[in-house]
Amino acid sequence: MNRRQIILAGSVAALASASNAAAPAADASGATRELWPGGPPGADTVKVREKIVERLPEGPMRDRYAEHVTRPLLTLFAPKTAYNGITLLIVPGGGYVRVVFDKEGVEAAEWFTQRGFAAAVLRYRLPADGWAAGADAPVHDAMRAVRLLRSHPIVSGSAPGGVGVIGFSAGGHLCGRLLTEPKLEYSRSDAADDQSARPDFGVLMYPVIATTGPHAHQGSAQQLQLGGVSVEDLQRYTPSFNVSEATPPTMLIHAADDASVPMENSLLMYMALRNARVRSELHLFDAGGHGFGLRSVEGKNVAAWPTLVQNWAIHHAAS
């Protein structure tokens, strides 16, 4: 454990016991929190080794991703301005073969914390790496993350609640499952698991929704199958089929020229939300492609997406 992590550990303990008015914690940017004490469950048959890849070693911006995640982590970010009471769990994409945690994680966290949010970026396990939970392992990590953010808030004195999720691409599929499959559970690990894993709201960014049919993202569907999902059962892993009145308010954002995950994925999810009378909102932009995050939006209408999310989060976390 390095010096920054030691400092954060002390801060987390203080946050959990504090009873004073909510105030920002010591700067937690880049500090990590393990999801599972003693290691993640179901690891007996896991043979892979975690690997961190730097895609732009000489570039002006960092662009790392994780493969074969064996240490699921939260990277914590305290608000840089007055805390608005909302914590965002940010779930990057990567087609379920990697977790792109700078481009679709850290950069979003930095944007939102500059506007009063607390944030945590999730590095989650992947379906095909041999975990006992198979294709459910990533969702278990997200459930555990929500519970940890409620039981040990990033901001001192903040009450449980006000936790939203934002998922990108395959991370959007993961979050779609988190929002629509409330009975998907794992064995209790500690007192944190007594908290609710239901987010207060969700934001799905160019999400993978369809797992079968012409609009499916074949790469993500293949990884689910490698995680033990049969072809016959694959449709059950399409979040739009699992929407109910209990699904939290959900926003969807997509670009019409997305050549990797067609916009019909968001349309499918939006219609399911509407049919279930779930408060929802859909923004389709004419241009942006796939994986635009915050890097590829300058001069495009899609550059409005983080402000749209900010307004949605503030409204629905308080409702």
Image (cartoon, rainbow, N blue to C red):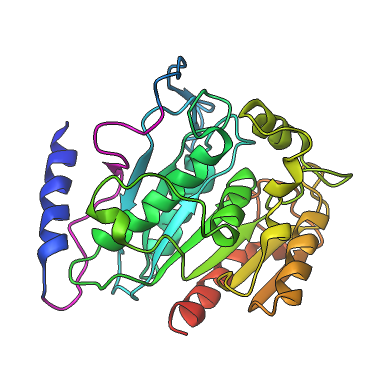
Quadrant in which the N terminus is drawn: top left
Q: Residue at x 45, y 18 (%)?
A: 45
Our reading of the magenta stretch's main secondary structure is loop
- Front one among 6 and 113: 6
- Which residue lies most toward the top here? 47
- Which residue lies most toward the bottom here? 319
Q: Based on the displayed image, in which of its 4 quarters is residue 97 positioned?
A: top right
Q: Is 40 within the magenta?
A: yes
Q: Is residue 154 visible?
A: no
Q: Is 169 within the magenta?
A: no
Q: Is 7 placed above or below 273 here? A: above
- Front one among 300 and 30: 30
Identify the magenta region.
20-42
Please indicate whether residue 248 sits to the left or right of residue 1 in the image.
Answer: right
Please indicate whether residue 294 sits to the left or right of residue 58 in the image.
Answer: right
The x, y position of residue 254, in whole percent, is 73, 59
Q: Is residue 235 visible?
A: yes
